[in-house]
Image (cartoon, rainbow, N blue to C red):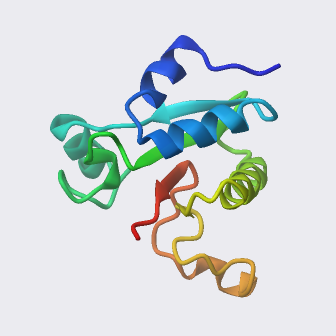
Amino acid sequence: MPHFSETSRVRLDTCHPDLVRLCERAIQNWDFSVLCGHRGREEQERAYREGRSKARWGESPHNAWPSRAVDLWPYPIRWVDTDRARVFAGYLLGLAAAMGIRLRWGGDWHGELCTRPSDERRHSFDDLPHFELVED
């Protein structure tokens, strides 16, 4: 059965309990890596400068404590395999819905792909690893 590496576990433990609960359930059926949970000021500003984030420090749900966002990628990591990442995102979004967790994915910021797939490329920033809790 898949399990978290020590590095993934440490990163996941910086996340909101709902994200931890979701990931612990998901790892039972799909192997994936936790790339990022909480980001401190320096790490967030570096992600912004390098174009990996559109948010400055304090603007990202990664900056909350515990983090309200987590970056995940199916294992083994093959960055070019975006189709597999999209299938994984569908699995995670469905699992979150079944668990009563409202989740937004960085590959579909407005949650419209299932109703308007032809508009997929209208987003200016695809962040396929990114999953965040939706504020109530």
In depth, the one of 26 and 127 nearer the eye is: 26
Say above or below: 135 vs 39.
Answer: below
Residue 129 in percent (x, y) is at 56, 48
In depth, the one of 108 and 63 nearer the eye is: 63
Residue 62 in percent (x, y) is at 33, 47
Residue, x 18% and y 51% (percent of image)?
A: 57
Say above or below: 123 vs 115.
Answer: above
Q: Quadrant of the N terminus?
A: top right
Residue, x 55% and y 82% (percent of image)?
A: 122
In the displayed orientation, state which residue is furthest to the top. Answer: 6
Residue, x 73% and y 52% (percent of image)?
A: 95
In depth, the one of 99 and 91 nearer the eye is: 99
Say above or below: 60 vs 70.
Answer: below
Residue 6 in percent (x, y) is at 53, 12
Q: Is residue 35 left or right of residue 39?
A: right
Q: Is residue 123 left or right of residue 37?
A: right
Q: Quadrant of the C terminus?
A: bottom left
Residue 61 in percent (x, y) is at 33, 54
Q: Which quadrant of the figure has residue 108?
A: bottom right
